[in-house]
Amino acid sequence: MQSTKPPRPTGVTIIAILALAIGVIGLIGGAVLIGFSALLASSIPFLGLGGIFAGLTLIIAGVVLFFASIWLLVGWGFLNGKGWAWTVGLIFSFLSILLAIFVAATGQLTGVVGLLIWGLMIYYLFTGPVKAFFGKGPAINPAYANPP
């Protein structure tokens, strides 16, 4: 007899929406950077600096679009209880913690807020019902137990 997947915890839905929102904001930001790079190329003709700045901006836009795509996939995986999404979400949350530490070290409040949010997300992903939903741990709650 096949075991049924436990129901999705409400917190997983919330972090899935957060991941999807990060992805959408990243896609918009990447598109804005691409437009900005075109503006730079055409408005700074001095010694070809516009082209250099435009190229650097395009590289940054590519990185932003890459990470935005990853967060969109992770959000979808969270909603569907994919085990790989749990793993990738943890990896990128730890990377986000490192970025938040850097931002906090510059004295910006957003870094502290980021540390709090990403720290809570990592903690939550390691709770029993969440791990059980993603197939990463034993069901510790009778509601998540496999049927006989």
Image (spheres, rainbow, N blue to C red):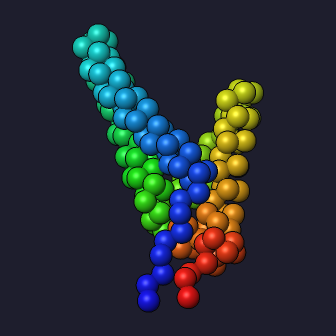
| Residue 88 in view, yes or no | no
Residue occupying the point 24% across, 14% down: 42
User: In this view of the protein, which residue sits in the foreground, 81 or 46?
Assistant: 81
Nearer to me, 29 or 5: 5
Left or right: residue 113 versus residue 84 is right
Residue at 47%, 63% (x, y): give it.
Answer: 81
Is 81 on the left-hand or right-hand side of 132?
left
Please identify the quarter of the rendering in which residue 125 is found: bottom right
* Image x and y of residue 95, in percent: 59, 51
Outermost residue toward the front in this view: 148
The reply to whether residue 122 is visible in this rendering is yes
**What residue is rendered at 61% in x and 68% in y?**
131
Q: Quadrant of the N terminus?
A: bottom left
Residue 18 percent location from the top left of the image: 53, 41
Left or right, 124 with respect to 55, comes to right
Q: Is residue 25 above or below residue 122?
A: above
Front residue (pair 20, 35): 20
Q: Is residue 103 above or below residue 140?
A: above
Tell me residue 121's x, y (percent): 65, 50
> Viewed as shown, does residue 4 lie left or right of 96?
left
